[in-house]
């Protein structure tokens, strides 16, 4: 999932950018090499929309860079 520190930085930066588009609060996160944990509180936007967008953008980045 995360091969380099740059991958983790991209993931987090993208998550911060998504906060401008979707209403949610990120309380805690942990990024490990093979998975992640996020504690999110959503507003009007459902969690599945936020995570779909996050995962889609990260997958595009990862496939292009590795």
Image (cartoon, rainbow, N blue to C red):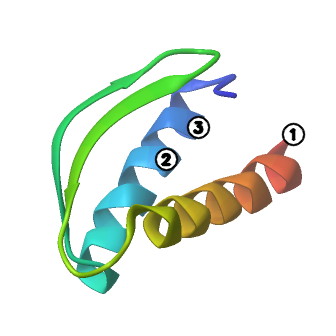
The residue pinned by badge 1 equals 66
The reply to whether discs 3 and 1 touch (Cβ–Cβ < 8 Å) is: no
* Residue farthest to the top, as pictured: 33
Q: Is residue 12 depicted above or below 44 in this figure?
A: above
Q: Quadrant of residue 20?
A: bottom left
| Left or right side of 24 for 14 | right
Q: Earlier in the sequence, mark 3 or mark 1?
A: 3
Q: Relative to the observer, which residue lies in front, 26 or 3?
A: 26
Residue 11's mark? 2
Q: Mark 1 falls on what kind of element?
A: loop
Mark 1 or mark 2, which has the lower sequence index?
A: 2
Between the residue at mark 3 and the residue at mark 1, the CA separation in whole angstroms equals: 10 Å
Q: Residues within 10 Å of mark 1 (few under 14, many from 20)?
A: few
Q: CA distance from mark 1 to mark 2?
A: 15 Å
Q: Is residue 39 left or right of residue 58?
A: left
SS of the residue under disc 2: helix
Q: Quadrant of the N terminus?
A: top right
Residue 7, label in figure: 3
Q: Position of residue 51 (x, y in %)?
A: 51, 58
Counting other residues with Cα less than 10 Å from the Cα at mark 3, is it few (<14), some (14-19), or many (20 or more)?
some
**Residue 3, above or below 42:** above
| Proximity of marks 2 and 3: CB atoms separated by less than 8 Å | yes
In this view, the residue in front, 10 or 44, is 44
Which type of secondary structure does the marked residue at label 3 adopt? helix
Q: Foreground: 21 or 9?
A: 21
Q: Residue at x 32, y 84 (%)?
A: 21
Q: CA distance from mark 2 to mark 3?
A: 6 Å
């Amino acid at each position: 999932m995360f091969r380099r520190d740059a991958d983790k930085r991209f993931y987090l930066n993208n998550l911060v950018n998504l906060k401008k588009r979707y209403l949610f609060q990120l309380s805690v996160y942990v990024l490990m090499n093979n998975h992640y944990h996020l504690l999110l509180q959503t507003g009007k936007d459902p969690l599945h929309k936020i995570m779909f967008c996050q995962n889609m953008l990260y997958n595009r980045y990862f496939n292009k860079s590795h």
